[in-house]
Amino acid sequence: MTAEVKAATAATPPLTERQEARRRRILHASAQLASRGGFDAVQMREVAEAAGVALGTLYRYFPSKIHLLVATMQDQLQHLHGTLRKHPPSGEGSAERVAETLMRAFRALQREPHLADAMVRALTFADRSVSPEVDTVSRQTTAIILDAMGLDRPTPEQLSAVRVIEHTWHSALITWLSGRASIAQVKIDIETVCKLIDLTTPSKG
């Protein structure tokens, strides 16, 4: 766990078991509504009703629809990270494993295109008030990539490569969702950018 992650964790008081259960119901309701109708289908009142919480309670957890959908993406990535840890990528090199991992993530989102669209739109619309949630999504994505690379202590150059890979993955999601890129093109772009990993790997010599 990096210093940044530790600081963020320390700054947020832990939820009680009951609060955590309530939060999980809210995130589940958000994902269900988004899966059926995309960004516009996620209305705060309907989320509250589906989760069985008062509207005021929902706003205490998530001040806006954008906060809620960005948190939903973080939750989806957390589930994906758990799955990847149980079934890690099989590629021989770091670049291959990261490309495989990101394409598995992409295909998971491909199965729920309305949900993917809602979450990506929320990330795109997010302003400074949503920065903590957006940062959490970024840290989760970074953790997934570093796990695939098999790194605990990446160099600054490797972290820079990871950031470029994240940007490319996010851009690929947007172009695919808008119909401007095929899955085949996304795969080529992801595999190409992952070659940066080999370029930033310290020489053993």
Image (tube, rainbow, N blue to C red):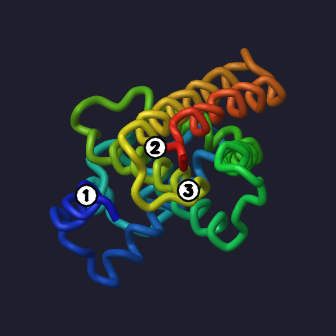
Left or right of 138, for residue 79: right
Disc 2 secondary structure class: loop
Hey, what amino acid is under mark 3?
A: Gln
Residue at image position (77%, 59%) is 90
The correct choice, above or below, for 73 with respect to 16 in the image is above
Q: CA distance from mark 3 to mark 2?
A: 19 Å
Hey, what amino acid is under mark 2?
A: Gln
The residue that disc 1 covers is: 56
Viewer-nearest residue: 132 or 19? 132
Viewer-nearest residue: 79 or 45? 79
Residue at image position (18%, 71%) is 13
Which mark's residue is nearer the viewer, 1 or 3? Answer: 3
Identify the residue at the far front of this view: 205
Q: Position of residue 201 (x, y in %)?
A: 53, 42
Q: CA distance from mark 1 to mark 3?
A: 24 Å
Q: Position of residue 49 (x, y in %)?
A: 46, 60
Residue 149 visible at all: yes
Left or right of 37, for residue 16: left
The correct choice, above or below, for 71 with respect to 12 in the image is above
The image quadrant where one finds the N terminus is: bottom left
Q: CA distance from mark 2 to mark 1?
A: 14 Å
The residue that disc 2 covers is: 43
Sequence order check: which comes first, mark 2 or mark 1? 2
Tell me, yes or no, whether the two marked residues, 1 and 3, touch with CB atoms within 8 Å: no
Residue at image position (32%, 58%) is 58
Viewer-nearest residue: 72 or 81? 81
The residue that disc 3 covers is: 76
Hey, what amino acid is under mark 1?
A: Gly
The correct choice, above or below, for 164 with respect to 29 in the image is above
Q: Position of residue 66 (x, y in %)?
A: 38, 39
Disc 3 secondary structure class: helix
Q: Residues within 10 Å of mark 1 (few under 14, many from 20)?
A: few
